[in-house]
């Protein structure tokens, strides 16, 4: 077995590990594509089929669970998840042949100051992929930005209908499974929830998430994903194109979202509305006061977010959190 700290180097299409040359049947390694604590991923050529593929090679730290991880990932057949084609061993070294995605990680992608609309699209695709995994009775294990591969889908080059909206981009979720084999099931589920929330915060770093949103630490990973979908919808709405004829409608949409998932800070919502111009603070205030206090006539509702509004919304939030956590425990 190789030591995790030993170098992995390509030599004429083969892999040099600790002075030992490994040749993968029918494959020619081209360059390193990514590296983690347990394995290294290489861009490679399948010489038999003449196509680009990715080859994941585990180091000694990942030897024992390599096949279990690969078996789990191979069951996740979905257009938003990286496909796995083959698992094998060369002189005892485990490796997997996977789909090659010509794109970049989410960590690299967000550094180029992408528009809010594009980041919302990435979140929605990420959420869709995770929901598929959860509905299959599994978890991802490492759902962070580094495992979101963002690519140009305008030519449908990956064999599925991936042209979403006007942006022509899509994602592939990679590395589903690398942490599920921890001893503590509770620890990995807590990690799943935290990484989903961290992904949202990083995708929407310019949206004051820490001030705008009060995220309960005890929410399950499924509930975390569900409520953050509402946050994504809110961000999409509040950053939409300003249309003066639709301000009343926009105020109603925003109120529906923040009551559907009452984890928002009303003061920050008001400031975001004021700064973006998507609606007006008084329209927003009237609609949420009408809903909270069950006022029949909209124009009779207060056009201010006062202490009574904040208190009523806080009560709704507390009830929502309590009921959500109780449902998660069932």
Image: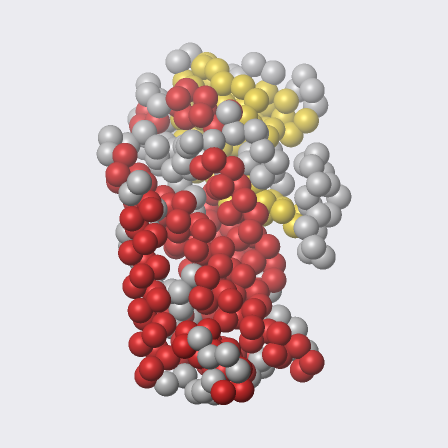
Looking at the picture, how far across and down is residue 89, in whole percent?
45, 15
Q: Residue at x 44, y 75 (%)?
A: 294
Q: Residue at x 51, y 50 (%)?
A: 106
Q: Is residue 129 left or right of residue 182?
A: right
Q: Is residue 158 left or right of residue 64?
A: right
Q: Quadrant of residue 214?
A: bottom left
User: Closest to the observer: 142 or 6?
Assistant: 142
Q: Is residue 170 left or right of residue 42?
A: right
Q: Is residue 33 visible?
A: no
Looking at the picture, how far across and down is residue 235, in whole percent?
52, 66
Name the quarter where the C terminus is drawn: top left
Looking at the picture, how far across and down is residue 80, in whole percent?
58, 39
Q: Residue at x 45, y 56 (%)?
A: 228
User: Closest to the observer: 330 or 264?
Assistant: 330
User: Closest to the observer: 294 or 167?
Assistant: 294
Name the quarter where the N terminus is drawn: top left
């Amino acid at each position: 077995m190789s030591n995790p700290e030993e170098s992995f180097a390509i030599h004429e299409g083969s892999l040099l590990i600790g002075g030992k040359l490994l040749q993968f049947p029918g494959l020619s390694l081209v360059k390193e594509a990514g590296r983690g604590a347990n394995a290294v991923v290489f861009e490679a050529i399948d010489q038999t089929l003449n196509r680009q593929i990715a080859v994941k090679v585990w180091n000694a730290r990942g030897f024992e669970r390599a096949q279990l991880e690969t078996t789990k990932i191979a069951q996740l057949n979905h257009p938003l998840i990286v496909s796995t084609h083959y698992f094998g061993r060369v002189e005892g070294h485990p490796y997997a042949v996977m789909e090659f995605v010509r794109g970049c990680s989410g960590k690299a992608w967000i550094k180029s100051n992408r528009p809010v609309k594009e980041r919302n699209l990435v979140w929605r695709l990420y959420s869709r992929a995770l929901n598929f995994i959860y509905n299959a009775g599994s978890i991802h294990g490492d759902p962070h930005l580094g495992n979101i591969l963002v690519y140009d889908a305008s030519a449908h080059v990956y064999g599925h209908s991936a042209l979403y909206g006007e942006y022509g981009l899509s994602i592939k979720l990679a590395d589903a499974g690398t942490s599920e084999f921890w001893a503590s099931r509770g620890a990995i589920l807590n990690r799943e929830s935290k990484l989903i929330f961290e992904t949202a915060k990083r995708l929407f770093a310019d949206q004051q998430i820490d001030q705008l949103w009060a995220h309960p630490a005890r929410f399950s990973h499924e509930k975390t994903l569900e409520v953050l979908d509402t946050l994504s919808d809110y961000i999409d709405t509040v950053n939409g194109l300003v249309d003066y004829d639709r301000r009343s409608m926009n105020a109603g949409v925003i109120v529906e979202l923040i009551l559907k998932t009452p984890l928002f800070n009303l003061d920050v919502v008001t400031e975001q509305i004021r700064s973006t111009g998507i609606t007006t603070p008084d329209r927003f205030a009237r609609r949420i006061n009408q809903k909270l206090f069950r006022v029949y006539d909209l124009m009779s509702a207060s056009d201010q977010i006062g202490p009574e509004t904040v208190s009523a919304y806080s009560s709704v939030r507390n009830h929502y959190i309590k009921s959500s956590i109780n449902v998660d425990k069932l």
